[in-house]
Image: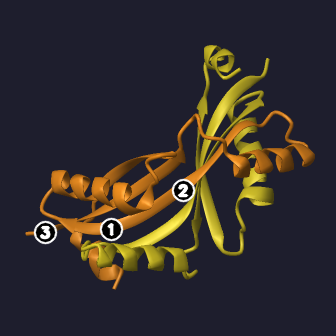
Chain colours: A yellow, B orange
Amino acid sequence: MNQTYQAKIYVTLRPSVLDPAGTAVQKGLQQLGYTTVDRIRIGKYIELSLKAEDESMASQQVHRICDQLLANPVIETYRFDLEQLPVAVLGEGQ
Amino acid sequence: MNQTYQAKIYVTLRPSVLDPAGTAVQKGLQQLGYTTVDRIRIGKYIELSLKAEDESMASQQVHRICDQLLANPVIETYRFDLEQLPVAVLGEGQ
């Protein structure tokens, strides 16, 4: 029996990598008067659902998906949370 | 005495808004063999730190920042977590 899991994935730039978008946002915020805002980093937040036999298999699959497609391991790291979806939610989404 | 807070902000497309980037990633994953992956939504994940008198003031400020700059309220929603940073962390970042 396959279970459905929702993964919430956070992809962030490695601390050593410059974040020009973050710097631009920080300058914009300072011009708007938010002078105490600091250390902005902009990353990606991805939600997806997938089917797997158990949480361990789902986790392995999400790791592979991140490594292959969602994150660039040279400049980015990722982490994710997994949550098993009740069967009822499946019906709602269709 | 101002405290330093870190905000972790999640900006996501409203459910009614199409997500072409998410659709493209889903097609890519299916071509890679991840056929059970479904309902991909791609959003932004933003980390920033700011100074405020207390958590309530910090929360108000982050709401204003999101409304003014980080999220487009027509097509996006946001949520965030606030965490008070210990003073020692400040020193590390500089």
Q: CA distance from mark 2 to mark 1?
A: 17 Å
* Badge 1: chain ID: B
Q: Is residue B67 above or below residue B1?
A: above
- Element under disc 1: strand
Q: Is residue A6 visible?
A: yes
Question: Compared to A76, does B74 lie above or below?
Answer: above
* Three-letter amino acid code of the residue under disc 2: Lys
Q: Which residue is mark 3?
A: B2
- Tag nearer the camera, 2 or 1: 2
- Camera-near label (3 vs 2) is 2
Cβ–Cβ below 8 Å for labels 2 and 1? no
The earlier-in-sequence mark between 2 and 1 is 2
Q: Could you say whether the residue bearing mark 2 is in a helix, strand or loop?
A: strand
Secondary structure beneath label 3: loop
Residue B59 marker? none
Q: Which mark is residue B49?
A: 1
Label 2 sits on residue: B44
Question: Which quarter of the rendered picture does the N terminus of chain B lie within?
Answer: bottom left
Q: Residue drawn 55% across and 63% down?
A: A43
Please, what is the three-letter code of the amino acid marked with disc 1? Ser
Left or right: residue B57 compared with residue A49: left
Numbered disc 3: what chain? Answer: B
- Farthest-out residue, left: B1
Report the Cα–Cα distance between label 1 and label 3: 12 Å
